[in-house]
Image: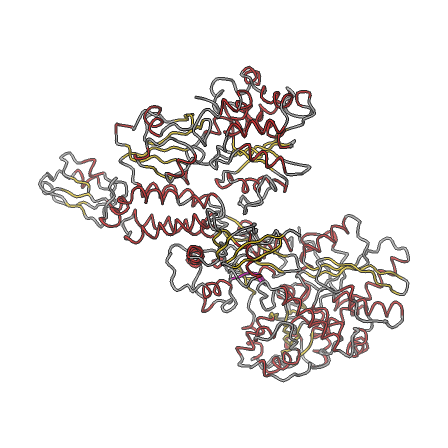
Amino acid sequence: MRIALRNCGLIDPEKIEEYIAEDGYFALGKCLTEFTREETIKEIKDSGLRGRGGGGFPTGLKWEITKNVEAGQKYVVCNADEGDPGAFMDRSILEGDPHSVIEAMAICGYCIGADTGLVYIRAEYPLAIERLKIAIKQAREFGLLGEGILGTNFNFDIELRYGAGAFVCGEETALIHSMEGLRGEPTVKPPFPSVSGYMGKPTNVNNVETFASVPVIINKGANWFNKIGTEKSKGTKVFALAGKINKVGLVEVPMGTTLREVIYDIGGGIVNGKEFKSVQTGGPSGGCLTKDFLDTPIDYDNLIAAGSMMGSGGMIVLDEDDCMVSIAKFYLEFTLEESCGKCTPCRIGNKRLFEILTKITEGNGVLEDIERLRVLSNVIKDTSLCGLGQSSPNPVLSTINNFEEEYRAHVVDGKCPAGQCKSLLRYDIVEDLCTGCTLCFRNCPVGAITGERREPHLIDQSLCIKCGVCFEKCKFNAITLI
Amino acid sequence: MDTVSLIIDNKPVVVKKGTTILEAASGIGVHVPTLCHMKLDDLNIENKPGGCRICVVEVEGRRNLAPACCTDVNEGMEVSTHSLRAINARRTVLELILSDHPADCLICAKSGNCDLQDMAHQLGTREIHYKGEQSHYRKDTSPAIIREIDKCIMCRRCEMMCNEVQTVGVLSAINRGFDSVVSPAFEMNLDHSECTYCGQCVAVCPTGALTEVDHTGKVIHALSDKTKTVIVQTAPAVRAALGEEFGMEAGTLVTGKLVAALRRLGFDHIFDTDFAADLTIMEEGTELLNRLGKHLAGDKDVKLPILTSCCPAWVKFFEHQFPEMKDIPSTARSPQQMFGSIAKTYFAEKLKIKREDLVVVSIMPCVAKKYECGRDEFKVNGNPDVDLVITTRELAALIKLSNIDFKSLPNEEFDNPLGESSGAGVIFGTTGGVIEAAVRTAYEIHTKKELPRLDFDELRGMEGIREATIDFDGLPIKIGIAHGLGNARKLLEDIQAGKSEFHAIEIMSCPGGCIGGGGQPYHHGNADILKKRQMAIYQEDSNKSIRKSHENPYIIKLYEEFLGEPMSEKAHHLLHTKYFDRTE
């Protein structure tokens, strides 16, 4: 079922005529000529649409709040600072159907009383930027942006603002500071942008996918939209499927679809017939869910209850070969890099979490480290300034909660069950099987193997770098990996 | 007035809407600890980025903990400031900060004066459970300020001072995540930046990340050199603050003890910068009247308003930021430099010694004075008019090092001839003081009448920008006052735009003037301390029998014996200066 991605790949995004042919700008016209601002907002509210950037805040309510703030100047901002590793939902929409976002921003502008829209887009998306520019130009030529849109007295135009690829600038206050030319740092809310945002004016910030859903809701009606999905999460959600799955890519499914349906029915199951281990949802600050959650219907609240989150729609599938401690470390390394550094728990706390995880994967962990991780993670969640820090320990907490035995294997038994943590691996030569062919001896890059020709060889563990070359080269299966 | 009722630590409290949890708690005697937050009441200075997260408190029904400093109260809110959850979080956050902070408290310049150290004590931290990599940055030194940013805790107070209050814009956060730190752009050295050395960053830094360049060692060496005559001058604001370093109440005047301490330290002559302040008034006041006279005579080339030039940070500020206006400020040197110049000519001649054998030490409330004394135009054949500058804080350290029990010292008198001063010289230490002193003299010279009153209340106060019109016997003189460089910028922009109607403007870089200087005892965010120092300065003025600069007998004598008259050729050579365009 395609709502946000309805036109992607089907129309030429550089031709406004093709968008119009698919009922494009019909919703804008309907709002401007048939609906009052209040009626339009009511339609969005009734649809149950919630923010697709990850927060899940009711979109219509956000518009209403911004509308109700008295101010001469207001702004509509589209958050196109998609920064989750592996996610490209927003990019696909902007590249494949830019007019859907432009149309929705104009509708939003009409509702809240703004005449200026700003798209905050990462400079790393050149094609999306190019297509947006073309689309904005065409919309102006067609009188769909600019002054007196569609013969009414509504004025609205859109400008682009470029981000330099900072993940934290997806946080709306940081995004606004970045647009103002300041350091991309979040500030304490309240005041919310809807009250005091860009240049201190009321600002409504929505994500690309949220906007892309709006024209359809207006065209087909709130009652059509709110029949799709679960009780509290309506419509569809786009996910970026990745990892150990046969079919990777974007998938748009109705809310309430189960993880199993997405992973097995749509994604075609696990690569090489391996066993499913976990699915990571919600991007770098989401969580890792076990197979027990495979039949959980996907929606905002269920994912949070399960210890993860919707996020902007990243979905990475892990199999039996993935080490959960390393996965937690991988995600934390990302947030560590992307923290703005403003608040202590995120700046230093995440660093310390990362160091403890590194210690564990290097085989130097102790049992207390697991509890230390848990305690520190909870304090970071409890005290961080913005959503980034408040959710950054999620990969750690969810892997500890769901895969604690794997952590214990690292620190108690000194083993990595998935065989990923090199420091915990041990290559040995089985004396009885070794023929003394010297192949391993000749290929070892660090000279850790010794032995006479036709005599069993020996690996010096203090020199071994665990590269596995000997294991691969041995023709007699004489090398074991523990 | 809308009020809000809430409960804090089981106590009901009613406060104004818009009050923060921190303020509401403080009202009922609950002092939630803070680190990055700092507020100087009445000066309109507040830092609350909500970044340190030390002040987190538990709010019933809220998902996460709330930073008390930047969370407004709500009706019916139930707050617990010392629940297990809040204490655990607060201690953990502090441990995290400490885990990235050098543990060299024993030898740190801020030991005993460090907000972070106090916090560790207050929270009873006995162990740091989190260990790991620590930040390491290059130590940056300049003529006045040392940046040891391994000790930076990202409270951003310095950044707020530099950008919002002073509008100098040198310090800001750079890098991301664990590597983020406050620094000049591209981690350049301070002395390559537009830093004015006002030292307000130092004044508010909670740790030892920003401190003054310590010259106490050089002073000790000079004092022990038998071949040198070492004289000392002490700025007006020092006497109103030095006592704080010895546990005395803020605003206690310690002029007599200060002189006694300096004498015991071994200085050969104890002089007063206030004397040079009187001299400044003679020169600057005359310059004002000259310019004003020409202006009234219709001379289109004359520049008004005249701006004061006592403050070295302010001088460096306009040299960087408004170089096209460098001919507007008075050409009069600062009192410190006038003193040095007179000491190494007039006084050295009296002593019959070479200027090279005379060491001039200044005690200043200021760190920029360290930079000022090193400017090339204040040197003769490479020998500076003022050799060494130490701050009020450094003097206190020197007194302690020399085993002097400051509090039990008797009151002693300055030496002559450079130790006598008028009340006008004293008030240089506070915002509004220089211009008031100038008015007292300029009025009498211009009108040739005695002033009916000496206290100009309309020029006093703590407001960032003040203005008043003084009646010079029928001639209305419009006066502006700004303290804080951001306020100065506003007045300068008005001049640039041709909107300024002032005849004279006094500018001081530091909020409060020199009493709030970057070299003064740390105020730890308590603005009352500044106000008490200001009151002390005015009290010292009232105590003086001579309160007008031109009536200082030693000033009169100096002109008779040496300088001739104000703005004379000799005065011009020794007491005036020129400014440079630093944008090139």
What percent of the width, then of the height, locates residue A370? 31, 50
Q: Is residue B42 above or below residue A2?
A: below
Q: Nearer the viewer, residue B71 or A443?
A: B71
Snapshot quadrant of residue A317:
top left
Answer with left or right where residue A261 lies relative to residue A77.
Answer: left
What percent of the width, then of the height, locates residue A49? 50, 30
Q: Is residue B208 above or below residue A120?
A: below
Which stretch appears magenta? B202-206
Total marks shown come to 0
Q: Nearer the viewer, residue A338 or B357?
A: A338
Query: How would you classify the magenta stretch by its main secondary structure?
Result: helix
Q: Is residue A138 visible?
A: no
What percent of the width, then of the height, locates residue B251? 65, 72
Q: Is residue A374 magenta?
A: no
Q: Nearer the viewer, residue A102 or B260?
A: A102
Residue found 71% across the figure and 78% down from its top:
B419
Snapshot quadrant of residue B336:
bottom right
Residue found 24% across the figure and 41% down from its top:
A417
| Colouring scheme applied when the structure was drawn | secondary structure
Answer with left or right where residue B575 lies relative to residue A250.
Answer: right
Answer with left or right where residue B296 lies relative to residue B32.
Answer: right
Q: Is residue B1 above or below residue A61?
A: below
